[in-house]
Amino acid sequence: MTEPLFRADAYLREAEAEVIGHTAEGGILCDRSLFYPTGGGQPGDSGHLVWSGGRLEIATAVKAEGGAIALVPAEPSPLPPVGCRVTQRLDWGRRHRHMRIHTGLHLLSVVIPLPVTGGQIGAERGRLDFDMPDPPEDVQMLEDRLNALIGLDLPVTDSWITDAELEANPGLVKTMSVRPPMGQGRVRLVRIGEGLSQVDLQPCGGTHVARTGEVGRVEIGRIEKKGRQNRRVTITLAD
């Protein structure tokens, strides 16, 4: 397995690692990964590796067999050999915007308390699809409520429960189309707010900002109809 450094510290931008293998597709397997692998609607991270005598741009990261994470080169190039010590450096600007969007989408699911049927995170915008038979009457009100929640500057923290505890509390799961990251015996919960100020708690394996104020102001775009009852709500970072 690859140790997921991003899970313990989403703000880590550089880390050492050892190459432990290569995939048939030309990916690089390391014993620990700074790069978040594509999953849960969040894109894989990009950046680069450097080692003695070499440098390699990383386009993305993906999940590999056995709990490993494969780093995908941006273009064909000699790979660092197995056993090589490398320094991983993240495209921090892109990752941080993913973190801001991801946390903003969690808050969007608070403002629109309906089942989520899909979602996608980008560096500039993100969207959630809701089981929403009728469109909202006042989109500006939703945007104002969302930005008010962001402005509370609530802490964003995580904790862990067992798979069995999650099964016993199905109301924690908001997404209908994506299963929570289960199968390892425990599930990560992301909490926004604390105590009486808690506004959201749901399973999530992605990266988030430490406080909601870091999201910054967002704008809600046109709400699109996607199917008989699904409607797509997009948020865009205003800065």
Image (spheres, rainbow, N blue to C red):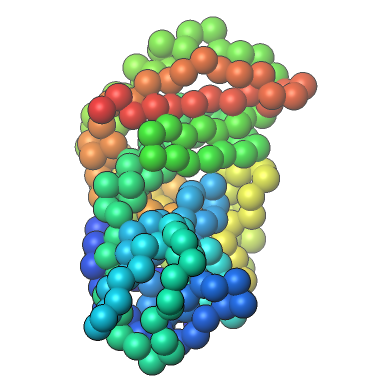
Query: Which residue is situated farthest in the bottom direction here?
Result: 83
The part of the image, by quadrant, that contains residue 52 is: bottom left
Total number of numbered discs in the rendering:
0
138 relative to 80 in the view: left or right = right
Q: Tell which of 142 and 2 is nearer to you.
A: 2
Q: Quadrant of the C terminus?
A: top left
Instruction: Please report the residue visible at 59 percent of the width from the left and 66 percent of the height from the top.
Output: 182
Q: Tell which of 61 and 216 is nearer to you.
A: 61
Q: Is residue 222 at least partly visible in the picture?
A: yes
Query: Looking at the picture, how far across and down is residue 192, in whole percent?
Result: 35, 45
Query: Looking at the picture, how far across and down is residue 157, in whole percent?
Result: 32, 54
Query: Which residue is situated farthest in the top direction here?
Result: 137
Q: Is residue 205 at least partly visible in the picture?
A: no
203 relative to 5 in the view: left or right = right
Instruction: Please report the residue visible at 44 percent of the width from the left and 48 percent of the height from the top.
Output: 201
Q: Tell which of 102 and 32 is nearer to you.
A: 32
